[in-house]
Amino acid sequence: AQTVTQSQPEMSVQEAETVTLSCTYDTSESDYYLFWYKQPPSRQMILVIRQEAYKQQNATENRFSVNFQKAAKSFSLKISDSQLGDAAMYFCAYSPDNNNDMRFGAGTRLTVKP
Amino acid sequence: DGGITQSPKYLFRKEGQNVTLSCEQNLNHDAMYWYRQDPGQGLRLIYYSQIVNDFQKGDIAEGYSVSREKKESFPLTVTSAQKNPTAFYLCASNSLGAGRVNTEAFFGQGTRLTVV
């Protein structure tokens, strides 16, 4: 089975600063999809950003952007101008192209300091 | 409004009893998933289904069973064979979009199961 690794159990950032969350994955597939999800204390999972592996351009959604390195199998999330509402658990997820076997990493707990 | 609904939000089970968690979606999604979330371990895949009357085991299927008799419904039964069932359970769904682009997964609000 494909694996997703998030090596940072916890991260902290000062409000208005930038933070990068790391994610690596293991796959033999060439076509797949990568996602970052946010889970606030309510435990509702919210999609932050997605990346298709066939696209070389890194995805961007407002203050959120990714650094997708396909050869290195790396998919990091950068949060710019961090806000107090960004505090949450962040999960990296992988989904292969030809089926719906979606796998998640262990998560990174992000704290935002005022 | 379209969405995915899990019920109940909290569930208590006595040891040795089976219990079924409900998951319903009206998003017309093909695929549905069950995940278990424990502290420090993220989301672990229990079962998933890509089509009615078909499902596959995930990484931690032992002690669980599922059915997919309708596209909208994917109930999870936690059996007495599951040795440590106390956890937070999340149901999700997604679909293959146009051009076989996997869509994002939509999640229910979860069920907290406690064995007493």
Image (cartoon, rainbow, N blue to C red):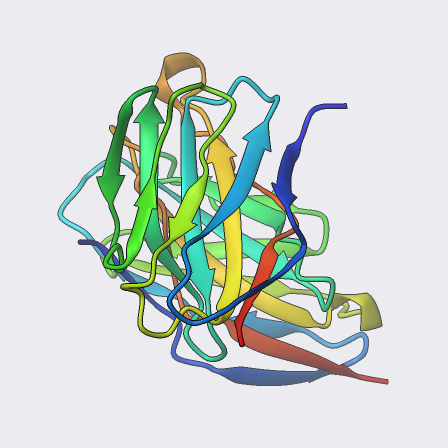
Which is more toward the observer, B5 or B96?
B5
Where is B34 relative to A82, above or below? above
Q: Is residue A65 above or below residue B87?
A: above
Image-based side of A2 in relation to B48, left or right: left
- Residue lying furthest left: A28
Residue drawn where x is 80% and y is 74% of the image: A16
B42 left or right of B26 in image: left
Q: Is residue B58 above or below residue A80?
A: above
Say which quadrant the N terminus of chain A sits in. bottom left
Residue at 49% in and 34% down:
B93
Residue B90, x across and y down, in percent: 52, 52
Tell me the quarter of the image containing the C terminus of chain A.
Answer: bottom right
Q: Nearer the viewer, residue A13 or B71?
A: B71
Work out whether A28 lies above or below B44: above
**Residue A61 falls in which quadrant of the image?**
top right
Q: Position of residue B65 (x, y in %)?
A: 31, 46
Residue A13 location, x and y as percent? 69, 83
> Residue at 71% of width from left, 56% of height from top?
A63
Q: Quadrant of residue A44?
A: bottom right
Number of numbered discs: 0
Residue at the right extreme of this rendering: A114
Residue located 72% across and 69% down the image: A41
> Horizontal placement of A8 versus A64: left or right?
left
Please provide percent x and percent y for residue A40.
Answer: 70, 65
